[in-house]
Image: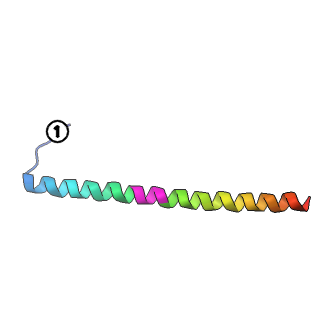
Amino acid sequence: LSFRVPSLKTQDYVEEAKKQIESAKQRKLKKSKKEMRKRKKKERANKKKARKN
């Protein structure tokens, strides 16, 4: 994949790509943290249920 862009613009594209990758990483991290919290909450609830029975 190759396309010609003026060199000044290339730097902007590179910076933009870096930013997008970084924000994607952050989003993924946030999502996985949320999932972990949900899972822990469920586990706690299950333990409580098990204790009751």
Query: Image quarter for residue 26?
Result: bottom left
As for residue 27 lying within the magenta part, the answer is yes
Residue sitting at 21 percent across and 53 percent down?
Answer: 14
Q: How many marks?
A: 1
Secondary structure category for the residue under label 1? loop
Location of the C terminus (image quadrant):
bottom right
Q: Residues within 10 Å of mark 1 (few under 14, many from 20)?
A: few
x and y, in percent, of residue 27 in the image = 44, 59
> Dominant secondary structure of the magenta stretch?
helix
As for residue 30 lying within the magenta part, the answer is no
* Residue farthest right in this picture: 53
Residue sitting at 9 percent across and 56 percent down?
Answer: 8
Q: Is residue 50 left or right of residue 21?
A: right
Q: How is the image coloured?
A: rainbow
Q: Nearer the viewer, residue 7 or 44?
A: 44
Looking at the rendered structure, the kind of residue marked 1 is Ser
Q: Is residue 32 left or right of residue 11?
A: right
Q: Nearer the viewer, residue 33 or 4?
A: 33
Q: Nearer the viewer, residue 3 or 22?
A: 22
Residue sitting at 15 percent across and 55 percent down?
Answer: 11
- The residue segment tinted magenta is 25-29
x and y, in percent, of residue 12 in the image = 17, 58
Residue sitting at 86 percent across and 57 percent down?
Answer: 50
* Residue farthest top in this picture: 1
x and y, in percent, of residue 18 in the image = 28, 55
Location of the N terminus (image quadrant):
top left
Say which residue label 1 marks: 2
Query: Image quarter for residue 4?
Result: top left
